[in-house]
C-alpha cells in the first residue's frame, strides 16, 4: 500500500478491490486531510449542524443519493439541525479507502447546504 490519502483523488464509485481495512497509522495520516472527522473504534465519524430540520433532511437526502451512487452506505443519527455520519466498511471490519473517499464527498455535500462541524 505505501501511498498516502489524497482527497482530490477520491473515486466516484466504490472499488471492491480497494476495500481492505486500513491500519491505525494510515487512518491517522488520512485524518490530517479530513478536518472535523475522527476515528471512533472501527469507523470515521463527523457531526454536522444545520439551520433546521429541512436543511438537515436535505443533507440526508443528498447523502442517500451519494451512498446509492457508490453502493456504500453510512450509519446516520439524525435530529433537529444535526446529523452524525459514520462511515465504515462492514465486510472489511473497519475503515477503508472507500470510507475516506466518501468522507470527502460528505464534506462537500454538507458545505453545499451550509452544514458546519459540531
Image (spheres, helix red, strand yellow):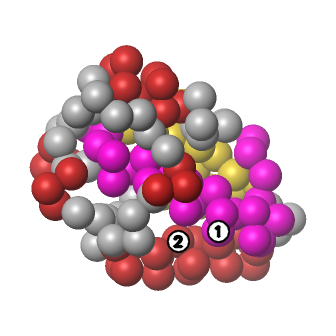
Check disc 1 and report its element: helix, strand or loop. Answer: helix
Residue 21 vs 19, above or below: the answer is above
Q: Position of residue 75 (x, y in %)?
A: 41, 55
Magenta segment boundaries in residue numbering: 94-118
Main SS category, magenta section? helix
Mark 1 in CB contact with mark 2 (< 8 angstroms): yes
Place residue 80 in its image quadrant: bottom right
Residue count near mark 2 (Cα–Cα under 10 Å), binned few <14, some 14–19, many ≥20:
many
* Magenta stretch encompasses residue 58: no
- In the depicted view, which residue is nearer to us: 78 or 107? 107
Q: Quadrant of the C terminus?
A: top right
* Residue 42 visible in the current orientation: no
**Which residue was labeled with disc 1?**
109
Residue 94 vs 76, above or below: the answer is above
**Which residue was labeled with disc 2?**
63
Which residue is located at x 33 percent, y 71 percent? 13
Amino acid at each position: 500500500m505505501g501511498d498516502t490519502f489524497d482527497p482530490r483523488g477520491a473515486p466516484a464509485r466504490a472499488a471492491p478491490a480497494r476495500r481492505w481495512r486500513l491500519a491505525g497509522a494510515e487512518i491517522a495520516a488520512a485524518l490530517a486531510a479530513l478536518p472535523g472527522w475522527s476515528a471512533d473504534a472501527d469507523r470515521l465519524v463527523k457531526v454536522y449542524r444545520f439551520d433546521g430540520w429541512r436543511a438537515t433532511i436535505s443533507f440526508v437526502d443528498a447523502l442517500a443519493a451519494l451512498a446509492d451512487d457508490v453502493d456504500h452506505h453510512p450509519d446516520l443519527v439524525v435530529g433537529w439541525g444535526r446529523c452524525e455520519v459514520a462511515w465504515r466498511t462492514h465486510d472489511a471490519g473497519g475503515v477503508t479507502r472507500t470510507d475516506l473517499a466518501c468522507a470527502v464527498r460528505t464534506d462537500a455535500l454538507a458545505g453545499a447546504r451550509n452544514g458546519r462541524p459540531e
